[in-house]
Image: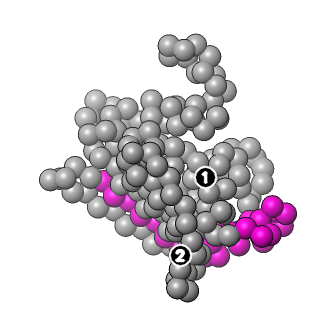
């Protein structure tokens, strides 16, 4: 129901879960875990998908991407959120899932956490991204993506997705008022 006040939020949840579930399927053989939480009092929607696959860095290395040879896990996560960076190759729409989830979280002033191997990326509502390596032998064998959105911020999913695509350089603004083109 498009008139439902939370339809934009439902569309966002569907999009994030679908994109991250596709990553679980492609990179871990479909073995993953999902969690969702809605807190009415605080107005948060929290989503998390995790797998026990090979992780982002090893996915890059296994397909022989030369720039990944001496990369850290944190650098691999940072690279994975860039547009059109994928260990899958073609078609060109691959390699935008993490990019758009990250950019929508940024546009919606949300929280994002990506953990893979020894790497950790965090995005806070103030739009700061921090990427670092875990210390003391800590290591997550697959990839975890967790995002927290405020329900009140996400009203228009289509506008949020379009803004994320523009910001990521996947769409170019044709007319500064409202029109977008590929």
Q: Is residue 61 highlighted in magenta?
A: yes
The residue carrying mark 2 is: 134
Q: Secondary structure at mark 2?
A: loop
Q: Is residue 75 magenta?
A: no
Disc marking residue 144:
none
Mark nearest the camera among 1 and 2 is 2
**Residue at 27% across / 52% down in the picture?**
44
Q: Position of residue 115 (x, y in %)?
A: 52, 68
* Snapshot quadrant of residue 131: bottom right
- Residue 26 appears anywhere in the view: no
View extreme (bottom): residue = 137
**51 versus 20 height, above or below:** below
Element class at badge 1: loop
Disc with the residue nearer the chain's start (1 vs 2): 1
Residue pictured at 32% horizontal, 34% vertical: 155
User: Which region is colored magenta?
Assistant: 45-71
Report which quarter residue 158 is drawn in. Answer: top left
Q: CA distance from mark 1 to mark 2?
A: 19 Å
Name the image quarter holding the C terminus.
top right
Q: Residues within 10 Å of mark 2 (few under 14, many from 20)?
A: some
Task: Determine the residue positioned at 81% across, 61% down.
Answer: 67
| Residue 32 higher or lower than 151, as above or below | below
Q: Which residue is mark 1?
A: 81
* Quarter of the view holding residue 47: bottom left
Question: Residue 7 appears at what percent x and percent y?
Answer: 32, 38
Disc 1 crowd, CA 10 A, few/some/many (<14, 14-19, 20+): many
């Amino acid at each position: 129901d498009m008139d439902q006040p939370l339809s934009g939020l439902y569309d966002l949840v569907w999009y994030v879960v679908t994109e991250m579930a596709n990553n679980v399927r492609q990179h871990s053989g479909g073995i993953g875990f999902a969690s969702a939480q809605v807190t009415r009092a605080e107005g948060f929607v929290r989503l998390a998908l995790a797998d026990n696959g090979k992780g982002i860095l090893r996915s890059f290395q296994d397909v022989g991407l030369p720039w990944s040879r001496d990369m850290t896990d944190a650098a691999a996560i940072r690279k994975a959120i860039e547009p059109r960076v994928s260990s899958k190759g073609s078609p060109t729409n691959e390699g935008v899932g993490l990019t758009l989830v990250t950019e929508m979280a940024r546009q919606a002033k949300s929280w994002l956490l990506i953990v893979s191997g020894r790497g950790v990326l965090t995005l806070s509502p103030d739009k700061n991204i921090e990427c670092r390596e875990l210390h003391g032998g800590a290591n997550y064998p697959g990839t975890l993506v967790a995002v927290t959105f405020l329900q009140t911020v996400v009203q228009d999913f289509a506008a949020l997705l379009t803004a994320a695509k523009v910001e990521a350089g996947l769409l170019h603004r044709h007319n500064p008022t409202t029109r977008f083109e590929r």
